Amino acid sequence: MIKTDALIIGAGPTGLFTAHQLKLIGLDCEIVDNLDKIGGQCIELYPDKPIYDIPAVPECTGEELTNNLINQLKPFDIKFHLSERVDEVKKDGDKWIVKTNKGTSFTTPNVIIAGGVGSFEPRKFSVEGHEKFENKSILYSIKDKNIFKDKTVSIFGGGDSALDWAVELSNNCNVNLIHRRDEFRGAKATEDKVHELTKSKKINLFTKFQLKKLNGSSKIESIDIEDNDKKIKNLKTDYVLGFFGLIMQLGPIANWGLNIDKKTVEVDTEKFETNQKGIYAVGDICNYPGKLKLILSGFHEGALAARACFKLAKPNEKYRFEFTTSSKTIKNRLGVKSD
């Protein structure tokens, strides 16, 4: 059982900044996220897309914003539990017992839900037998592109991720790009590049085809794809990549006894606390009169929720507000030398 002053559910921008605020005021925290990487929607949905409404940052991508927030956390020792989904939250006296789908258990007086629009899970193939190849020969995200070097990779999808990776992997892989339609949904410049690489035979493009069958025992050896006229093609392949977007759903949060309206969690605007004492919701997942789904709003909500956590985490101590510009205590926590 892991003991912590606060548990944050969600490693997106709001969750990361909330962790920063908790550590500034001397509270411990840990972060759980269903995704396999830090960054939430910023990394999964628009890592390369420009963001124009972060204060004092005229323009940055989702990846740049995430990296900056991670750098801001470097002075602190924060444990991340990635690829874990919180399934159970139960009251135990003045604490909450939180359990994940992988059996990790926490005891904490404060739970901060910073889960964006809920849990993200990739849309998966429905073809028979796909389960035994997943995380081996079938992947829905790429951690290390080097594993594909000199291999044959079959990419399914018609959006930015499918097109971007088809272009990227064509440098040192044999790439099959399969899409169920003629039209793509990605950036035109990338689509043009795909067609250019198709003409030069660096990408094998198959449109109006879908996955019909996986062939192989312990690993995929080939796939059968079927066109709209029910004609079958067999393609030798080492890996199958699926980029069909993400399923966004509230998930187990719906079972925690919270007031929920239209898949968002209702909170007050003093502490961003839910109807359950010690459970807060910040970022896109929370709702209150005048709510704006902006990253900067999530930062504000996280800062207030963090300070509300202090009272429950350290009931015998009085919280004293301090400015980072002048507080020696905060500078010590940050590892900054005081004047």
Image: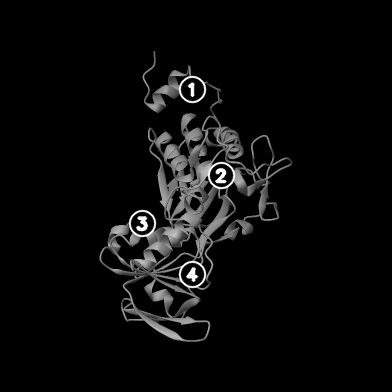
Residue designated by label 3: 143
Disc number placed over residue 124 in the picture, else none: 4
Q: Nearer the viewer, residue 199 or 318?
A: 199
Which residue, given by chain and number where applicable, does mark 2 sit on?
A: 112
Asked whether disc 3 touches disc 1, contact meaning CB atoms under 8 Å apart, the reply is no
Q: Earlier in the sequence, mark 1 or mark 2?
A: 2
Q: Which residue is mark 1?
A: 324
Q: CA distance from mark 4 to mark 2?
A: 29 Å
Q: Quadrant of residue 213?
A: bottom left
Q: Amino acid at mark 4?
A: Lys
Q: Residue at x 36, y 58 (%)?
A: 168
- Distance (Cα) linking label 1 and label 4: 46 Å
Comparing 281 with 317, the one in front is 281
Tag shown at residue 47: none
Secondary structure under tag 2 reads: strand
Gap between marks 3 and 1 measured at Cα = 36 Å
Q: From this viewpoint, is residue 10 visible?
A: no
Residue type of the residue flagged with mark 1:
Thr
Label 4–label 3 contact, CB within 8 A: no
* The C terminus: image quadrant: top left
